[in-house]
Amino acid sequence: MTLNKKQKKQIDVHRQKIQKLRQQLAGAKQQMDDPAEVKRLQAEIDQHEAAVEKIKNEPG
């Protein structure tokens, strides 16, 4: 399956957000000031990963 330019850009944006969120998550895990923040960040990462999979699986 080939992705068009728009789909590639959307995936790139999601991956950049995932990378930023993972850095924030690592920092939040080290500090553990707010355990809810760790869950929130992980949920956001999961949402972006799901969006990437959805884009990859969209028909033409």
Image: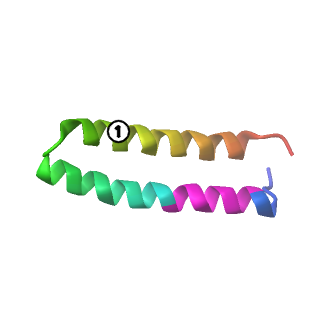
Asked which colour scheme the image uses, the reply is rainbow
Q: Front-most of 5 and 36?
A: 36
Residue 46: say if magenta: no
- Name the residue: 61% across, 42% down: 51
Q: Which stretch did the figure color magenta?
A: 7-16
Are there few (<14), some (14-19), or many (20+) residues within 10 Å of tag 1? Answer: few
Residue 14: say if magenta: yes
The residue pinned by badge 1 equals 40
Classify residue 41 by image quadrant: top left
**Secondary structure of the residue carrying numbered label 1:** helix
Where is residue 16? Give x, y as percent. 51, 62
Q: Front-most of 40 and 59?
A: 40
Where is residue 24? Give x, y as percent. 30, 56
From the image, give the main secondary structure of the stretch colored magenta.
helix
- Name the residue: 39% across, 54% down: 21
- Name the residue: 51% across, 39% down: 47
Q: Front-most of 14 and 59?
A: 14
Q: Is residue 56 left or right of residue 21?
A: right
Q: Is residue 51 left or right of residue 43?
A: right
